[in-house]
Amino acid sequence: MMSSKKQILDALIDKYERSKAYKEGARRIMIKLYDNGRSDLRSYNIENSEEKESFNKAIEELKKDDIVDFEWLKYEIGNIISQVWLLPEKVNNAYMIAGRQPKLDKVEAIVNYIRENSSDVKHKWIEELFNNICAIIEKKRSITVALPDNNELARDVLYAIKQIDSIDENEVLERVFSVRCFGDSKRFEKYIKKRVVTIIRKNYIDDPDNELSDEEVLRKVGIIKAPEVVEFCGNLTVCFNTGKVDYSPLKFGATINSFDIRNCNLIIGENITRVLFIENKANYLDYILNHKGSDDLVILHGGFYSPVKGLFFEKLFSVCNKSSVRFYHWGDMDLGGFKIFARLKKNIIADLIPYNMGIVDLKNNRNFLIDIDEKYANKILLLLKQPELKECYDTIKYIALNKVKLEQEAFIREEV
């Protein structure tokens, strides 16, 4: 059981760290032990004489050591203590007796750690993140909510972010990443992952509403649960280091493992006039089985693409860029679907065209529309600030005005 002396000091130190005195100094920090039946320290129980005497004795000893001072309850001198306060000039002594590291030492250690490990950061968002964390800590003299209060865990989170900076297009398995960072295949998943995912959401992919799964968020920075595959169907030949493969005979589609994508080259068939990215798997399968033309090259986009899938998209766009091939994207008509379209257009395919994503498509599938609330509608309207979505502005306005959205699966009229 925690000693009475430590409980008193912990309560005073906790209040001190939350107060202006921590930032400005020279303020008395006080807790009430008994005030008309109320107490800031529940374990100070006046009905239990043994526990009460233990606390009284501890406080008297701390007063003798000039760490605290206190006041007896009126008419209960020597029996019930009303309040106790920490002497401002003895805060460091209180930390030492309580066996706690001073908060200021903890925050300065984190700032020093960031500065020592951020000099060679390559990604702008990570550089800005580290700078912002340091600025917040130095201003508030407190660990930012983005990091755990525990210094060891905070350093591990920062180190994981720093290691993400070196992944680039080279995907790494989650457990391999954990071993590289901490020498333990499960430490990242157990203790670090949630914090890292939250940081990536807010600082890199603008997903504060948790629209993406944790795995999708990590995949975007190149950390994967298992090797990713790219799925496609059409007249495409892929040149690997070990040979050339013509995928055009595969009418039900083909896949390439992500580890093969880095060192391959693509040759698109001369008959291809349209490349169509499809967000959802069910629609991709339905399209290649029931609607695909011979001049179509169909790509399963999935959710927010990872670095290696983005590399495949870049290679595909590069070989088609000087031809008459046009690029289309078909996704859900909702917040996530429009963001996926905007990202692909902004980062890789500037001439990307929306497919089946207009007002007429909403009206033709009115029986499958899903209601949205005012909050969601307002978020949809914020998309009008993104120039990449200018072809979708009318659809976005219609969705917000009518408070509805549409998922791709509504277009499937038969079982795949």
Image (spheres, helix red, strand yellow):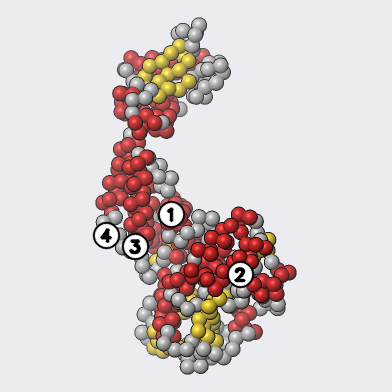
Q: Residue furthest right?
A: 367
**Residue carrying label 3:** 123
Depth-wise, is mark 3 or mark 2 nearer the camera?
2
Residue at the spot 40% in from the left edge and 17% down from the top edge? 59
Decide: is 398 above or below 234: above
- Give me the C-alpha separation between circle 4 and circle 3: 9 Å
Could you say whether the residue bearing mark 1 is in a helix, strand or loop? Answer: helix
**Residue carrying label 2:** 395
- Give me the C-alpha separation between circle 3 and circle 2: 34 Å
Q: Earlier in the sequence, mark 2 or mark 4?
A: 4
Q: Which three-letter amino acid code belongs to the residue tagged 3?
A: His
The reply to whether discs 4 and 3 touch (Cβ–Cβ < 8 Å) is: no
**Residue carrying label 4:** 120
Q: Earlier in the sequence, mark 1 or mark 4?
A: 4
Residue 199 got which mark? 1
- Give me the C-alpha separation between circle 1 and circle 4: 20 Å
State the image coordinates of residue 27 (x, y, percent, origin top left).
37, 25
Q: State which quadrant residue 406 falls in.
A: bottom right
Q: Which three-letter amino acid code belongs to the residue tagged 4?
A: Asp
